[in-house]
Image: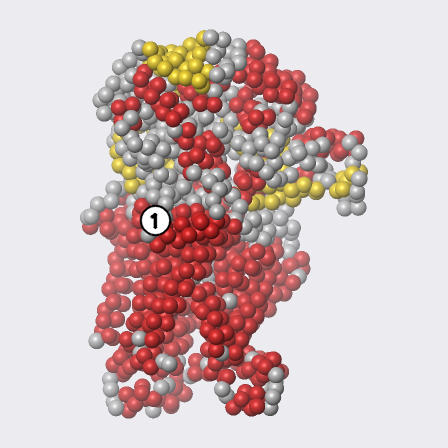
Amino acid sequence: MIGKFKAGMFASALAIVASTVVIAPAVTNVASAGATTASTPLNLANEQGMLWSCSFNPFNPSYLPYSVGLTYETLDFVNALGNAKVTPWLAKSYAWSNSNKTLTFTIRDGVKWSDGVAFTAADVAYTFNMLKTHSALDLNAVWTVLSSVSTTGNTVTFNFMNAAVPFFYYIAGQVAIVPQHIWSKIANPVTDPITKPVGTGGYLMNKCTPQNIQWTRNANYWQKGKAVIKTVNMPAFLDNNTCNLYLAQGKSQWGSQFIPSIKSSYVAKSAGNSYWFPPVANVVLFPNLTKAPLSDVAVRKAISYGINRSSVSKIGEYGYEPAASQTGIVAPTFSKWLSAAAKSAQGKSYNPTKAKNLLKAAGYAKDANGYFAKGGKELAVTIKTNGGYSDWVASMQVVATNLKAIGINATVVPEAANTFYADVYNGNFDLAYNAESGGPTPFYEFRQWLYSKNSAAIGTAAASNWERFNSPAVDSLLNQYTATVSAATQKSIMNKLQNILVNQVPVIPVLEEVDWFQFNKLAFTGFPSAKNPYAQPGLYNEPDWGYVLDNLKPIK
Amino acid sequence: MRYLVRRIGFLLIALWAAITLNFFIPRLMPGNPAIAMMAKFHGHLNPASLHAIEVAFGIHTHENIFVAYVQYIGNTLQGNFGTSLSNFPNSVTSVISKALPWTLGLVGITTILGFIIGTAVGAIAAWRRGGVLDSVLPPVFIVVSAFPYFWIGLMAIWLFAITLNWLPFLGGYTETVTPTFTVSFILDILNHAVLPAFTILITSIGGWILTMRNNMITVVAEDYVKMARAKGLRPRRILWQYAGRNALLPNLTGFAMSLGFVISGAILVEFVFNYPGVGFMLLQAVENEDYPLMQALFLLITVAVLVAIFLSDIATAILDPRTRNQE
Amino acid sequence: MKFSTIVKGIWSFIRRDKKAMAGTFILFGLLLIAAFPNFFTPHDPAAEVYMPGVGLSWNHILGTTSFGQDVFSQLIAGTRQSMMIALVVGFLCTILSVLVGITAAYAGGWLDDLLSLMTDVVLVIPTFPLIIVITAYLKSASFWLMVFVLVVTGWSYGARQLRVQALSLRNRDYLLAARARGESSIYVIFVELIPPMTSLIVANFLGAALYAVLAESSLQFIGLGDISTQSWGTMLYWAQNNAALNAGFPIWALAPGIAIALLGSALALLNYAFDEIANPALRPVRAKQLRAVKS
């Protein structure tokens, strides 16, 4: 009996395996065929290393909510790739008054929530006041500068404690407006998953499974003629490689991936595969300013001159991320902010001879190992980086080789992500390689780097300014900038800050961080490009990616 | 009976050890989940949100570690694992319940298949000592079992999914399809399971072949098998009912453990194939410092192993009279 | 029994057994490479100075990586770490297994109960998830940390096996005689008890070494090891993170996998052979002999 039973199981097991192998080719071939029409779905590809939670709370702190920009919208759109140009969105206009301490928005008429209820100024005030009550939702910390938000008719008035003009970007451009008639009935908006988001945007969540989120177009969208794609899918990818293969096989038409050897592994694989990587911020070496030897400006300058940034870019990042400038200005995105004086003071950015001379002038001399030393102490530094990003580790290995060549004994320490970020935030490093979020003008990144109030004592987590830079003069320049709307004053302040970056080297920009963006130009049209950079193209940029979706059209 | 009581006692101690280990490991390690969350956004989150995240996660509540331990044991026994930080605000239980069926389906079935095929082949190899099967299979599977199984997975993807484009390499089913209870959807699931199942089978089957073969060789030499032969029973019957049954017994515990390890066993296979199971979820929880999720997963895996061992103990007690007479 | 006789016996067995012979050859070759990598390495394995993504050529017999490193040189340089992990973890696990297993069997009583309980608990706690959790937390898993984690999780299987065998030997006549002579426990254990168990101990060493090689490469592959070191596991990590298979440098991912499998196979083949020594019934027989026995 037992014998027969086993033999039977064995045979049926083989049969299952055999039958799946046989049906396999048939199923896949069907999936990959077909030409683009209005009903062709757009598939998005951005690896997040997780299955979807199907929670669309736009104030979720734990992962990208995938609702801001396409389902929930903002008051204005601020384009980081277009000189912070403001496009009116849910608000049709805005005005500063009361020496830039009051900001008034006039709300657009005729906009409806996706459940048919009219959108009003009260929704805006409700949203902001809810962020005040539930500070866990205030991801942009707008209530650190606001004092009150109120409505009169179709206007919403924001009062500030002090003038904080750059916060316009967060208030108007980042905070998603939610419907009062639904949210006021939610018991706890912090822990509510919001599984069926009701918004004003062009695309509405249709179905969500752990493996895929699907959106359909909002037929009653207030921007007529926009948001025309019937179905948008976003499969969940757990691993970068799988996501890259999916893109390469042409199954996705819009991706935001780091793809190694992109020409051979993506562009060449399917017709129409293209990419564009616009720079948006810097990836920076943060020197620990609180301890020797990096408290010595000569050492920091020598490091900056000793790094061959174009070689770092080529080897570490396949050339995708261009070399950064010690002035801190990201080119070409923010080139009009570049200070000619700072640029000429810096001179040639890779200059190993000058680096060695700077160290000699500061009293360092080569020791028996061939490294510079002073007072019996060898110039030895560790570079900590996130071991989870193989491109960063590869980049830092090039930097370490560069530094050894100018007589600084540098060692790369790739750390587990959790350890690395704990070390960076708490100031436990010599040099740490990391990036700030930046913003629509260079000011945002400079403030994140340099503002002393962002920092914290060593051993306490600092939100930014991890190098612990502290200069009352710089703080005052940053405060002056936040109080003005004058472009000329802003420019002159930024010039001074660039000089400080060049002369004091509080941080050492190495490469420019880019938006990862791949697209198939044969399937859909309307993507942002170098010629028309109307929004950031990365799928993780909110609300930009939703506004790009509004503009996309299938190619017939 | 005495045997079972002893085993239950042992399993309870093992459970307590796992629960305690599970409590202390994360607390002895550096890091902070709010910072891990910030880091996950790779700089696309306003630095000021660090505070908001800490508020949402309830971090910075300094508690007495002993009180926390007692609370933790209480919560664990009630099956209350809290909120997953990386899937905030979903509960750990709901997050795991989404992933568990996939792992049970893929890895569970392949483990059972591997055991059955391996045991059958091993028994036959031992029965036909020196035959073709016996001289070819052991060395082949010794070598195959020594391959890193994630690497076999990578090669399978490269060959069958990329180069030949025969099979999918991503997920549990075609990603944009909505799950329904239809034949075509089930075929789609099977289609997606072929490569990962093949990877697990090919690397796990060798162990069963070898252990069964070795047990069988010892058993075949025993008197009662010789007796059965002398009595002129059909060889098939001797093979499966006499020798096979007894050679299988020592393997039962091993099989039970591997069934329990099903949940964890294929972590890297799930990772390589983007299979949406709990093994991958554990990696994700570790990466995001999602303590509650990590603890629940680790516990789930341990309990599964212990339950499987317990079941095999019962089976052994029933099938093997010797255990009843112990002591 | 003298150790020299045992060693001679083992050697004569290996010489006659094809599987054991193959395993010994591979292991010896890899040991040689690990001991003298510079003799085999044509290029600096870390140097990123060659043309990236070069195919097979006389200058780069396995091509180069996308960073322009020589794949063959990396493979050679990586041998040492994998061999070290195998040997050190195998050795430490064996010591621990022998210590716990034999003490338990020899002492008996409550100590046996306690040690056996410990062994069984460690045995049932899922190892790989535990290793992942531990290494993910500790600072960039260095060599010794990896060794520590693998030893802590890897000794129990061997301890259990050795205890069982030691128990069966404990009451043999020559052991009882030695005790009756008034020999110390240390003497009895080291001179009378352990030598007959040599083949099982060696088999355990090989098993633990195999486990270490596979677990280490798995951890490194998912980036939980120190990725700035040279080893086969980290080679796979870098190859996978740079899409070696899809971007046209398949050798970069193929070579380290085959190298791990080679070392693994050598250990597994030897392990299998030592099982055969420990249990003579398992030794291969010729079909003719078998028929003679059966009839």
Residue type beneath disc 1: Asn
Relative vertical location of residue B181 with respect to residue C265 in this rendering, above or below: above
Nearest to the observer: residue C32 or residue B248: B248
Residue neighbourhood size for the residue with mark 1, other residues' Cα within 10 Å, grouped as few (<14), some (14–19), many (≥20): some
- Quadrant location, the N terminus of chain B: bottom left
Element carrying mark 1: loop
Task: Residue B144: give x, y in percent of width and height.
Answer: 43, 64
At x 26% / y 71%, what residue is drawn? A6
Quadrant housing residue B313: bottom left
Relative vertical location of residue A178 with respect to residue A405 in this rendering, above or below: above
Quadrant housing residue A451: top right
Task: Residue B236: give x, y in percent of width and height.
Answer: 26, 80
Task: Residue A382: give x, y in percent of width and height.
Answer: 65, 42
Q: Is residue A281 left or right of residue A253?
A: right
Relative vertical location of residue A145 with respect to residue A316 in this rendering, above or below: above
At x 23% / y 71%, what residue is drawn? A5
- Which residue has dot 1 on it? B80
Nearest to the observer: residue B254 or residue C111: C111
Q: Is residue B155 in sight in this rendering?
A: no
At x 59% / y 86%, what residue is drawn? C1
